[in-house]
Amino acid sequence: MNQEPQPPQSLVDSLARARQVLICTHVEPDGDCIASSVALASALRRAGKEVHQFNPGPFDRSEIQTYRNEFLPSVPAYLRTPVEGRLAVVLDCSQPERIGDLAAEIQALSTIVIDHHPVSQPMGDSTWVVPYAPAAAWLVQIVIEALGNGLTRDEARLLLFGFSTDTGFFRHIHEQQSPSFLGVSRLVAAGASPRDAHAHMYGNKTLESRKLIATLLDRMQSHYGGRLLITWELQSDTLKVGKENRDSDSFYQLASSIADCEALVLIREESPGRCTGSLRSRDSVDVRPVAQKYGGGGHKNASGFLAEIDCMELVGRVVEDFAPAFSEPDNRASG
Ligand SMILES: [Mn+2]
């Protein structure tokens, strides 16, 4: 595989024809969906279109705060009815539940979907899902380029930020994703700087945010001979430092560097009796079944869920949930 994927011509045509575009992205937004949305909005406005951006929030991640005012949490009633030239675009997800109430609000509209999450039944009238794409930002870049007006420097910077978010600044890219570097090369040629993108993502952290990581590491439990590592963040920890001082990626980076770790779990008590779980794995361990058990989902190596369960009870349950994954002896050496 050494060619970049191309979007269906019908999808590019419907974007080119649209006069008014409503871009919707997923709950608990991240750098990939937000940057993809803002870059696409910019390119469409350059092409003379009216663009509205929607995201259900919450905007908890510090690196996307700059963009939160560009998004509305719900679609105003006057935009929900189908009229000639009005088009909804769903980015970085393809299941209605991932965009919350927005799904019902755009239900009557003609909808296109651009995503990199593998799902069996994507929503939308015209759909472009490329599961081997490391980020939606790369697909959005290709769509913007297909529209024929090039990329501005700001759009290139945004897309590199999105790409870097989902790839952990290139750490998660594997050899089957080589064509994505062609896209990155064009972003850099258009004026995006990897050095600045790295500083934007990994710099400017507060001391409190580093201390929170220290707390999580200090609490960490090791199970199944060190193959599963699990830790938790209590609401009192979060209140002490503020949600904006959460830095999951730096935490995963540190914890996953521990020898023998194959799966990593971070449980966060959002409020008493209500927790989110983030699951990460290296290589062969599939964390999706555990996330799905609590109504969540995601990728084989990165999944999440929200559960109405007491924090410490959930920690115990999740450890047991991983028993099937680790029932086989460690066969990485032979595999
Ligand atoms: Mn993504």
Image (cartoon, rainbow, N blue to C red):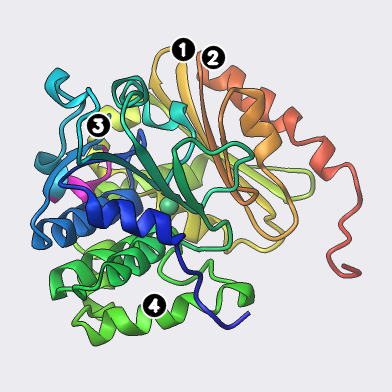
The percent coordinates of residue 315 (x first, y second) are 60, 27
- Say which residue appears at 47% left-offset and 75% top-offset: 180
| Disc nearer the start of the sequence (3/2) | 3
Cα–Cα span, label 3 and label 4: 41 Å
- Front: mark 2 or 4: 4
Q: Amino acid at mark 1?
A: Gly
Q: Which residues are magenta?
A: 60-66
**Pointers 2 and 1 in contact (C-beta within 8 Å):** yes
The answer to if 304 sits in the magenta stretch is no
In the image, residue 101 sits, relative to residue 63, either above or below, namely: above
Cα–Cα span, label 3 and label 2: 22 Å
Q: Amino acid at mark 2?
A: Ile
- Front: mark 3 or 4: 4
Q: Amino acid at mark 4?
A: Gly
- Say which residue appears at 75% left-offset and 56% top-offset: 284
Cα–Cα span, label 3 and label 1: 19 Å
Foreground residue among 326 and 173: 173
Residue 240: give its label.
3
* Crowd around label 2: few <14 · some 14–19 · many ≥20 (10 Å): some
- Label 3 SS: helix
Q: What residue is disc 1 on? A: 273
